[in-house]
Image: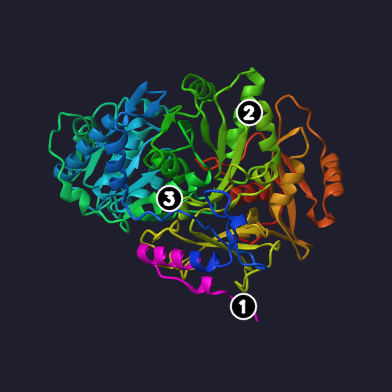
Amino acid sequence: MLKISPILRLYRSNSSSIIQRCTQIQMISTRNLTSGDNHHDYLSPYVQLPYSYAFGRSQGNVIYKTLGQLMDERAEKDSGRPFIVSHHENIKKYFGEFYEEINHLVMAMHDHLNIRRGDVVGIWSSNVYDWIVIQYACLRLGAILCTANPFYQSHELDYAIRKGEMKALFMPGKQSKQNEVNDFFKIIRETLRNKSENEELPLHLKNIITIDGERYDENDFPSNLQIKTFELYKLKQYKAELDRSIIEAVLPDDPAKIVFTSGTTGRPKGACLSHFTLANNVSLIMRQFEINGEANCCLPLPFFHSFAGVLGNLMPLAFPESQIVIPFLKYNLRDFVECIQKHNVTFLFATPTLAIDLFNYVSRKNHQLPTLKAVLAGGAAVPEETVYQFKATVPSCTDFRIGYGATETGPGLSGNRTDSSDVDKAQTVGQPIDFVEVKIVNPETKHLVKIGETGELHTRGHHVMISYWKEPEKTAKVLQNGWYNTEDLATMDERGYIKIVGRTKEMVIVGGENVYPREIEEVLHMLPSIEIASVVGVPDERRGEELCAWIKYREGVPEQSHEELQEFCKQKLAYFKVPKYFLTVDDFPMTPTRKQQKYLMRDISVEKLKLKKSTKK
């Protein structure tokens, strides 16, 4: 019978109990700690050999503070330090200026919009400076910020407003530059006015506040809605004195944000994250990446998602010497490179797709990025070859690290450190961050698997969401006894380093053999002609499923025949892992955060190959 240590039995749900559990685990896991283990300012993870369980030990402490408290501490110590640059808006702010703006907005939201602690406030906008002002003000007031994708169309926006139960919505106004991204006015009118007699308007929504552009005419909207102008509340025209009792009423366990999942498997769910989760995630995962000294951090990823919206946006609260840099309104590689050069960007948040786009553009245009020192990549698996190619193209970038997490984990749970080997940085997602538990289990029995064996990754700790907003049944499916089931397939080594090998739902069963697409993708990326390879399962009458590889070739490179690709794979892989089908493509179905939508790729593959549809979900 599998023996489980006392560590795995310790669980309670709220932040104070999480802190207590972390202390107990720390004591258990350091009983036999030798002096040789303690040569850094951090401790190596405790690994429960021979099983795949690791706990991120630390010499530091879990933070029990609200984000508003962290803002106060930052303002007291470093109000005169640069905080943010918006390249496309030509805005530069010091923290003291920014702090004054958010305090004005806090009182305006409280007094004029009747927003209270626990109310949900929506933001539907692209990456602009005021997005960050609104986020910080909501967090300070104790309102729950619900982020909506700026590419949403009317039925998607309607879903977000209703699901989030938004009381107010911040969005672009008429003649806004953001209309280059989407037709916001048309979509909001369709959402709120073009209803059949049997459909109800969103009941909770009372106010629409235009961030930029011109104010909407109230006649364009239902009579129960009030239309406000954001600029009045943000600046000194609104002079209400900050009421400290409002700020002090907010607690670390309070919900802070609702972040919708990426929708790679269907309709988005709203992950509800607490102040406790966000404060610790930002502090501890960036500590894992050892951000020291001044850092100009470029955020090209969309703010509505957790990678840039949490780690990127809130990083200056934990690391006052860091500065946020917003490169563009709409994805544009020329503006991106210009921003990196002009603002001496040293640290870049990226997805694999964005990193590939950047190094291809820099190579083609022969640009230099001499200040760029480090890249933190996440959001999807990063091909090992991409890491080496990026570092070769941008020689100053000596540190390309891969982090791992999910919207539901606030968003980070593991990462490599500065002294991790190049092989570890390229092939793994590192070790658990401080005070985070990770275990790899058999997907069927939920028992721990041994070191090196593939299983399903589960995690618990300060980083895990409260719940899916208003969806207890879906929450119960993925969150049990505090353990969040990522549904990712992974392995762990004896040092606690984790490697992601695929998704449980993406695993393909070929003639009874389990096949993980990531392994085949890594082999195909060895070919210099291939820019991106992605593998999905498709139905097969004889073997149940077969493999179909989508191939995007590098610009100007001749395509290879399917026979050549199959022959190459046969030299590297077992016969049942060799794709039967290959599709040459120019692009992939993507979420707005540039994650591949493999469920759509499967459907498209079936249609193009004229195969019989399966019932696999």
User: Where, by quadrant of the figure, is residue 566 drawn?
Assistant: top right
* Badge nearest the viewer, 1 or 2: 1
Crowdedness near tag 1: few (<14), some (14–19) or many (≥20) residues, C-alpha within 10 Å = few
Q: Which residue is mark 3?
A: 260
Residue visible at 18% across and 49% down? Answer: 246
Q: Which residue is mark 2?
A: 359
Could you give the CA–CA distance between mark 3 and mark 2, rounded to whole angstroms?
A: 30 Å
**Residue 162: x and y, percent?**
33, 53
State yes or no: discs 1 and 2 in contact (Cβ < 8 Å).
no
Q: Amino acid at mark 1?
A: Lys
Q: Residue furthest bottom?
A: 1
User: Mark 1 or mark 3, which is nearer the start of the sequence?
Assistant: 1
Q: Which residues are magenta?
A: 1-25
| Mark 3 closeness class: few <14, some 14–19, many ≥20 residues within 10 Å | many
Among the two numbered marks 1 and 2 on one chain, the one whose residue lies closer to the N terminus: 1
Comparing 262 with 452, the one in front is 452
Q: Earlier in the sequence, mark 3 or mark 2?
A: 3
Q: Quadrant of residue 85?
A: top left
Q: Nearer the viewer, mark 3 or mark 1?
A: 1
Give SS at disc 3. Answer: strand
The mark found on residue 3 in the picture is 1
Left or right placement of residue 296 versus residue 146 in this view? right
Spatial CA distance of label 3 from label 1 is 38 Å
Q: Nearer the viewer, residue 11 or 35?
A: 35
Secondary element at tag 2: helix
Whether residue 117 is situated above or below residue 30 in the rendered picture? above
Residue 372 at x, y percent in the picture:
56, 27
